[in-house]
Image: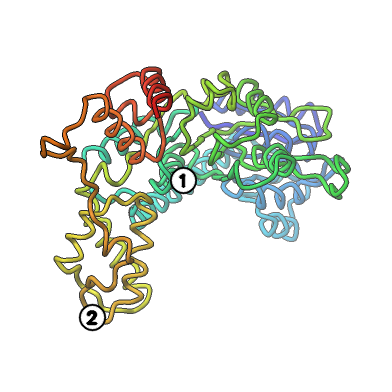
Amino acid sequence: MTRVLLVDDDLSLTETLQLGLARRGYSVTCASSATEALDALKLDDFDVVVTDLNMKGGSGIELCQKIAESHRDTPAIVLTAFGNYETAVAAIRAGAYDFISKPVQLDVLGIAVERAGQHRALHREVKRLRLERSARADNSEFVGASPALEKVRDLIDRVADSDASVLITGESGTGKEVVARALHRQSRRADKPFMVINCAAMPEALLESELFGHTRGAFTDARQAHSGLLVEAQGGTVFLDEIGDMPIGLQPKLLRVVQERTVRPLGATVETPVNVRLVAATNLDIESAVEEKRFREDLFFRLNVIRLELPPLRARPGDVLPLAQHFMRRFAEATGKQIDAISPAVAERMLAYSWPGNVRELQNCMERGVALARFTELGIDDLPERVRLHASPDVVVGSDPNELLRMEEVERRYILHVLEAVQGNKTAAARILGIERKTLYRKLEHFNAKS
C-alpha cells in the first residue's frame, strides 16, 4: 500500500483529501506544518509527500528543498491556489515531482500520487540493481568455493532481510566488516545509511558522543549539538566493530537502545526513536568476557540473536590460491602492470603458510608481490620473508622410544598447539578439541598448577 504524507494547515481541506485518497487505497498520514512533516519523515518512511505551498511556519517550497536534501527518493507533489508558471518553476526547481493547482480534483490528485509512487518504486529498483552490480563487481570477500565459505554465503542470504541483531565473530582479518556490508546490501535497508563505529578505537566519552549524540553545552567542547550515529543511520544499519571492547559503562545505554529502540543524547531530557539494524562484531572470546563480567550478559543475548562465525583462512585452504589470484589481478590492473600468473613455487609456499592474519594478510602479501614483481609471473622473491621461509610446525611427538611421552604431556602439547592456532580463543579451541569450555579451563588450570 502506497503511504502518503499530506501536509496542509487547512484542516477541512486536509480531511477531504485524506478521505478521498483513503478511498482510493492509499494510507494517509497528516501534518499541519513543514516542521511537523519533517519530524514525521524522520520517524517513518513515506512513498509520496503531498504539501500545500503556503503554510504557517514554512512554505511548501522550503519543505520540498529539505526533502530533496535528506529524502532524495521521496517524491513531493505541491498544491497551490496560485497556479502560475513562475510558481510551478520554483516548485520543480526546489525538487518537487509534480504541481497541482487548487481547487484540487481528487481524480487528478489520485493519478499524480499513483505516478509519484511508481516513480519512487522504479527509482528504488534501479538503485537496488546498481547496488547488486556493485556488490558483484567488488566481491573479493566471497572468492572461493569452500564449504565453510558457502555456509557463510547461505546464512547471509537467509538473514539479510531480517531486522534481528547479528553478532559476527572470527579472527582479525577474516572480513567481519565486509560481511556486515553484505548483510546491509542484500537487505531492504540497502538504500539507507550504513554506519560503522569501532568500539575500541576511541575513549569512552568520545565513543558515547559519537554513538548516542549530545546536545549543545552537554560538555565543555560541545559547541553544537550532534545527533549521533544511531540517529544518523535512521532506517539503515549500524555496524559496531570490536563490540567486545566497548567500555562496561556504555553497555547499559546500548542495551536500552536495543530493547526500547530509543536513544537519549548526552545532556538531553527526551529520547529519540531510532529504527536501525544492529550488526556487531568481535575477534574476542565473547563468552569468556561475559563469564569474567567484562561484558554484560543481557546485552550479549540481545546482540547474539543470529550468530555468524567466520572461518579463518587456514580452515579453507582451497580458497587461498583463488583469493591470491583475485588480489593479484586487482593490484596489477591498478598499477598498470602485466602480471599473468603465480609460479608453482609461490603457490606451494602460500599453501604451506597458515595465514594468521587471514584474508587481510593475504591481500597485503599480494599487494607487496605485485609492487615488487619484475616479470609477468610472481616469483619466490616477491613474497614476504615470513611466507617465503615459513616451515609448517611439527605436531609429531616423536618415535624414538627414549623420547616417548606420557599421554598427559601429549594432551597438554596438543591443547596448547590448538590454542596458539586460534590465537587464544578458548571457545574456538574447545570446539576444535570437541570438549566443553569448562573442561578446557579445568585442563589449563591443571597444566598451570603442574608447571
Out of 95 and 276, give the one closest to the viewer. 276
Give the vertical position of 25 relative to 337 (above or below): above
Count of all numbered marks drawn on residues in the image: 2
Left or right of 128 on screen, residue 417: left
The percent position of residue 333, horizontal first and vertical second, equals 33, 73
Characterize the local packing of mark 1: few (<14), some (14-19) or many (20 or more) Cα atoms within 10 angstroms: some
Q: Amino acid at mark 2?
A: Phe
Q: Residue at x 50, y 38 (%)?
A: 189
| Quadrant position of the C terminus in the picture | top left
The percent position of residue 206, horizontal first and vertical second, equals 72, 44
**Residue topped by disc 2:** 375
Secondary structure beneath disc 1? helix
Q: Amino acid at mark 1?
A: Glu
Question: Mark 1 near mark 2, Cβ–Cβ under 8 Å?
Answer: no
Q: Residue at x 32, y 39 (%)?
A: 311
**Residue topped by disc 1:** 177
Characterize the local packing of mark 2: few (<14), some (14-19) or many (20 or more) Cα atoms within 10 angstroms: few
The percent position of residue 29, horizontal first and vertical second, equals 67, 28
The percent position of residue 430, horizontal first and vertical second, equals 34, 26
